[in-house]
Each structure stands twice: as C-alpha cells, then as structure tokens.
Image (cartoon, grey):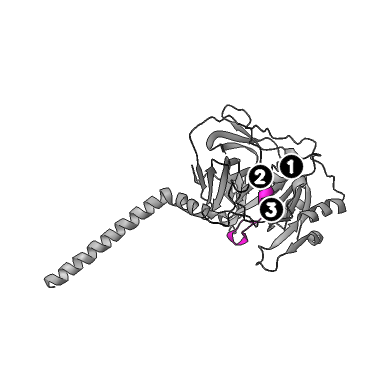
Amino acid sequence: MNLKSVKITGLIILGIFFILIWVLVFFNQGKKGIEVELLEESQKENEIIGPEENKDVKDYSLEKSEIGKLPVAVVIDNFSESWPLAGINMAAVVYETPVEADITRLLAVFNQDFLPDKIGPVRSARPYLAEWAEEYGSLFIHSGGSQDFLEKIKTGEYQFYNLDEISYNGVYFWRDGLRDMPHNLYIYGESIEKLIKDKRIDNQLKPNFIPRQFNETPVLNETTANLIVKINYREPVVWQFDKASNRYLRFQNGRAFIDENGVQTETANLMVQKTEIRILDKIGHRFIETLGQGDALIFQNGALTRGIWRKSDKTGQTVFYDLQDQEIKFLPGNIWVEIVSLDHQVLY
C-alpha cells in the first residue's frame, strides 16, 4: 500500500470515528432534552388552541352537578391511529392505563350535566377499567371486552349499569365510515341521555358517593419545580406545566395531544398511581391491582407532592393522601390519573 492510500485510509477511519462520537453525543443529549425540543415545536403549531387563547375553560367536575346525576364512564381508544379523540376534554376524571403491548386505553368519567356531543372512539373493556367505573356507580359504556371481564359481567360482579355496543344495545352507537375499524366507533351525548330514559335507569349518584375535596390553592409538601413529567408507555406521554394557565399540557409521541376540536388536552391535577401490574397470557392481557394502597405522585401548580393512594374495598373510592396522611385537595377542574407499574419509568 503506497503512502497516498495509507493517508486516505487514515482519513476515512478518522472520519468514521468522529461520526460515531457525534452520534453518541447526539443521543445522549437527546435523552435529556429531546422531549423539551419537541414540545416547544409542537406549541408553535397554529392549529393548536393554547391556554391563553382558550379562555372559556369550564369546570366539568362531578361535584358541579346541580342535581347529582349518574356519572357516565366510557372506555376510549388511545392507540395513535385513533387520534384525535372526541369528547375527552370534557371528562371530569380520566384514567390512563396500559393494556396489551403497553398501549394505553382511557376511562373517561363524565358529569352527565356536561356530556360532549360526541365521545370516542369507544373500545373494549377490561376488569380494572370496570373496577374504576364501579367506584362511581356509573353507567359503564364500552364495546365488548376481554374474556375475564365478560365472565364477570355474566355473574353480576359489578355494581353499575352496563352498556355494551356488542349486543342489542348497539343501536345507541355509530361508526364513522371515514375511519378504519376498530378505531371508528362513537356515541353521541344525546344517545346516552336517550338510553337512560329508555331503560328507566335510576339517574342519581350512588348514596355513598364521597365528593372529592377541592381547594383553590392546595398546600404542597415540596416546592421544587416539576415542569415536565414523562411516562414511558409504548407511546410515551409527556405533561408540560404551563404557568399562564396553571395547568399541565399533554403531549404524546412527541406532539401536542389535541382533540377533534383542535384543543390541547390539559389538567390542573395530574396523579401518578403506582400499582402492581402483571401480564397474564401470550396476548398480553394484564392484571392491575386496584385495591389496597401504593405510592402516588401528585403534580399541581408546577410542583410535586409525594403521597399514597388507598382503596379499602371493591365498591369504595380511591383516595389520595400526602405523606402526613392528609387527603389531597384538588384544584378546580378535571383530574387525570396515570396508572403505572413499578417497572414503568416516570421522569420529572
């Protein structure tokens, strides 16, 4: 090999070396800052209605009902192919939980006085989704379910009113022909009200329902700013605190999470509930523990309160406490509960 060839080979090797170094540095920085960069870019998009522009923010919490009507709990798709969702921003409480393949599914609990015109896409139920719906004694709306859930329904396991699309009750639902199945099943708010009248359902909150405690300015145990919360579901979720609105704005897969009306999803009360999650079979069905107690992270006002969650019996309600065993007081507005296993990574 002549001298010229040696120099060329040396330059090539040196170039490859620097490329590898650049790649390593790039990905290392990405782990720390890529989410923030993506969030900043997403917020610049014109079609998103930000918190300052969307001044007509209403309080849909269950405690705002004038009469105390029956809550409505709907199982909603959250696979990326189902976006944008309909009605999610009017829910009083939303539970986000992993299902098969660590894709998440939502249980949205609505105040019947503030039902959206359209809700969905509606998807199938799982036992743990039913167990959260049971806390409200709600009308539980879904489209079929896993085998273990369906068996429990047959034996009268749950104390709620069940509306399953895969039955004669399917007349209350409709499919959007412009979207692919199974991400195209919806229900109208007026259809829910019609069902309640048709079936003569007792339209009241259950007698032992305990209203949550609300406070305009909750006292926090920690003052350290927690402006970004990331959860590593299969399609990662990021919540970014917005000081102007005092709310956490939702992002998923690195983009702003907006509903069908172009409004970004947000919450003043972000709860992370840690619990036991086990995979039951090859399909990936999960057991999720909803009884007992476990660690919790409560994000409000851009700060963190460490605490615990407790649920003492099957038909009781999940209550969040701080480490001094004082019940958490919520800011007015919606509540978003992120269900995570002990193995999920939560960065904040």
Kindly identify which residue carries mark 1: 136
| Magenta stretch encompasses residue 80 | yes
Instruction: Kindly identify the amino acid type of the residue bearing the numbered disc 3.
Output: Gly
Residue 324, position in %: x, y? Answer: 58, 26
| Magenta stretch encompasses residue 48 | no
Q: Reply above or below: 332 against 175.
A: above
Q: Reply above or below: 23 against 220.
A: below
The numbered mark, 3 or 1, whose residue comes first in the sequence reads 3
Kindly identify which residue carries mark 2: 57
The numbered mark, 2 or 3, whose residue comes first in the sequence reads 2
Q: Please identify the quadrant where the N terminus is shown.
A: bottom left
Q: Nearer the viewer, mark 3 or mark 1?
A: 3
Tell me which corner region of the image, top left, top right, bottom left or bottom right, holds residue 276: top right
Q: CA distance from mark 2 to mark 3?
A: 14 Å
Q: Residue at x 64, y 51 (%)?
A: 106
Instruction: Kindly identify the amino acid type of the residue bearing the numbered disc 2.
Output: Val
Instruction: Kindly identify the amino acid type of the residue bearing the numbered disc 1.
Output: Tyr
Q: Which residues are magenta?
A: 76-93
> Would residue 250 be found to the left or right of residue 151 on screen?
left
Residue 97, position in %: x, y? Answer: 61, 49
Q: CA distance from mark 3 to mark 1?
A: 19 Å
Q: Reply above or below: 337 against 186.
A: above
Q: Which mark is residue 87?
A: 3
Q: Nearer the viewer, mark 2 or mark 3?
A: 2
Q: CA distance from mark 2 to mark 1?
A: 24 Å
Q: Secondary structure at mark 1?
A: loop
> Would residue 22 be found to the left or right of residue 265 on screen?
left
Q: Secondary structure at mark 3?
A: loop
Residue 270, position in %: x, y? Answer: 59, 41
Towards the viewer: 280 or 244: 244
